[in-house]
Amino acid sequence: MVKPVELNLPLSVGDVRGLKAGDIVTLSGRIVTGRDRIHRYLAENRPAKEEIPFELSGAVLYHCGPVMEKSGDGYRAVSAGPTTSMRVEMYEAQIIREYDLRGIMGKGGMGEATRRALKENGCVYLHTMGGAAVYLADRIRKVPGVWKLEEFGPTEAMWLFEVEGFPAIVTMDCQGNDIHGQVEEESFRRFSDLIKKVSSKS
């Protein structure tokens, strides 16, 4: 069994440059969430880093719209599965550059603009498990804070999660390798071969 790379957050450029596509990792430390509205707000309004209550430099931004519930004076995550990352592709490269992120996490991979930004800025894309939202919520040990809750609502707000042993796979590294793109190319090649075989028999 492959032993995962244990990553402690926040990440440095050295941490990220030591990772390659295909590495299995676990995250421990603080991550932030962000879906469509947070991405649009960061990209279009461009708030200064001082206006954001959480440190984004070296952070992992998780594409997640969690289900949250009140717990005492704070909150706890009931469900925290990844959302499809391509829905924020139009914003991601800009956000990586402007806020010095070291990791993006979600499911399904991202596009060419993000791939270039990962390579240029020392950042990786982490694919985590779809269909395991409750299990992933159990990796969240604490919810230290939230930003834009009243304005955007609990699903679209930016949550600060303290995680331990949060599992993921590096599928886009900062050397330009992209497992999602490789799978897509191989699938297209095999599909094309299949079409040719069927056509030759007809």
Image (tube, rainbow, N blue to C red):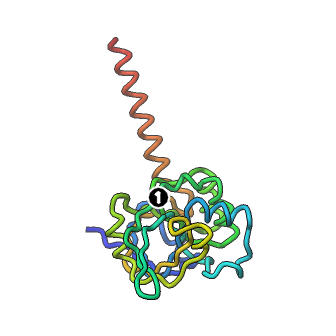
Q: Position of residue 149 (x, y in %)?
A: 57, 73
State the residue at coordinates (67%, 72%).
Answer: 99
State the residue at coordinates (44%, 62%).
Answer: 82
* Apparent side of residue 50 relative to residue 37 in the rendered image (left or right): right
Q: Amino acid at mark 1?
A: Thr
Q: State which quarter of the image contains the N terminus.
A: bottom left
Find numbered disc 1 in the image and state the secondary structure of the residue it sits on: loop
State the residue at coordinates (47%, 58%).
Answer: 83
* Apparent side of residue 132 relative to residue 39 in the rendered image (left or right): left
Q: State which quarter of the image contains the C terminus.
A: top left
Indicate the quadrant where residue 119 lies.
Answer: bottom right
Residue at the top extreme of this rendering: 202
* Apparent side of residue 27 relative to residue 49 in the rendered image (left or right): left
Q: Position of residue 69 (x, y in %)?
A: 41, 75
Q: Position of residue 47 (x, y in %)?
A: 73, 72
| Up/down of 181 relative to 52, above or below | above
In front of the other: 181 or 76 = 76
The residue indicated by pointer 1 is: 83
State the residue at coordinates (52%, 56%).
Answer: 85
Q: Position of residue 35 (x, y in %)?
A: 55, 62
In front of the other: 127 or 121 = 127
Q: How many marks?
A: 1
Residue at the left extreme of this rendering: 1
Q: Residues within 10 Å of mark 1 (few under 14, many from 20)?
A: many
